[in-house]
Image (tube, helix red, strand yellow):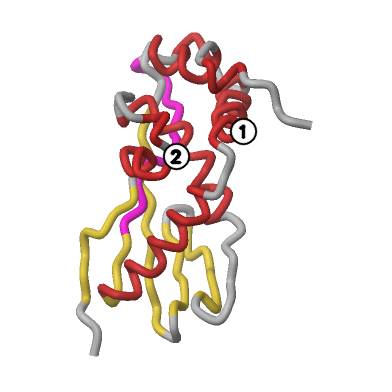
Amino acid sequence: MGVEKMGLTYEPGDLKDSFSELSGLEEYVLIPLFDTAVSRWIDHPQTDDVVTDARRLDSRTYSFVVRGKLVTVATSWTDIDWDDPDESWFKLSRLHFSGDEHLTQTLKDRIRGFVAAQNLGELVRAAGASLKQGKEYHLRSDVSHFYFASNLARQEVPQ
């Protein structure tokens, strides 16, 4: 019988383990990047002989069958609208895993591996494009700078 473990999380600061270029940035700045990267996997999970099924249970909870057992992933969201307390702009900011300890770690490692395999510059530009769909002038200045003016945001896409 596996050990149930609550509290295993994957969050924006964990992106620094995959991308050394992010060291020195606050976790808050990384929230839009995390939202973009993790949403790509969680909205279209890759199933195989280890992760055999994935279902959205509600707007904030997913279930995965990992090695024949259920692992639940709950999402947390953070309001990134820095400017206007009367408006909200929520981005995915944390995954909470529950279920068998080893299987939750397996699923977390799968998501982390998927994210680490992405092109960081492309992720930053995709997150910036997503932010441009909102009121970008409501963002904190360091968030704006990272997604619109940093070297990663301005890199040309290789042809």
Please tell me the numbered disc located at residue 122.
1
Quadrant location of the N terminus in the rendered image: bottom left
Please tell me the numbered disc located at residue 34.
2
Position above or below: 59 against 80: below
Residue 67: x and y, percent?
A: 44, 83
Residue type, label 1:
Glu
Alpha-carbon neighbours of circle 1 within 10 Å: few (<14), some, or many (≥20)? some
Residue 28: x and y, percent?
A: 33, 28
- The picture quadrant where one finds residue 79 is top left
**Left or right of 85 in this view: 128:** right
Which residue is at a point 53% across and 39% down the rendered structure image? 36
Residue type, label 2:
Phe
Quadrant location of the C terminus in the rendered image: top right
Query: Pointer 1 and pointer 2: residues touching (CB < 8 Å)?
Result: no
Which residue is at a point 53% across and 68% down the rendered structure image? 55
Position above or below: 11 against 21: below
Residue 121: x and y, percent?
A: 57, 30
What secondary structure is marked by label 1? helix
In the image, the segment drawn in magenta is 85-96
**Left or right of 31 in this view: 116:** right
Which residue is at a point 34% across and 16% down the rendered structure image? 85
Which residue is at a point 50% across and 78% down the rendered structure image? 50
Q: Observer-nearest residue: 37 or 97? A: 37
Q: Which residue is most to the bottom?
A: 1
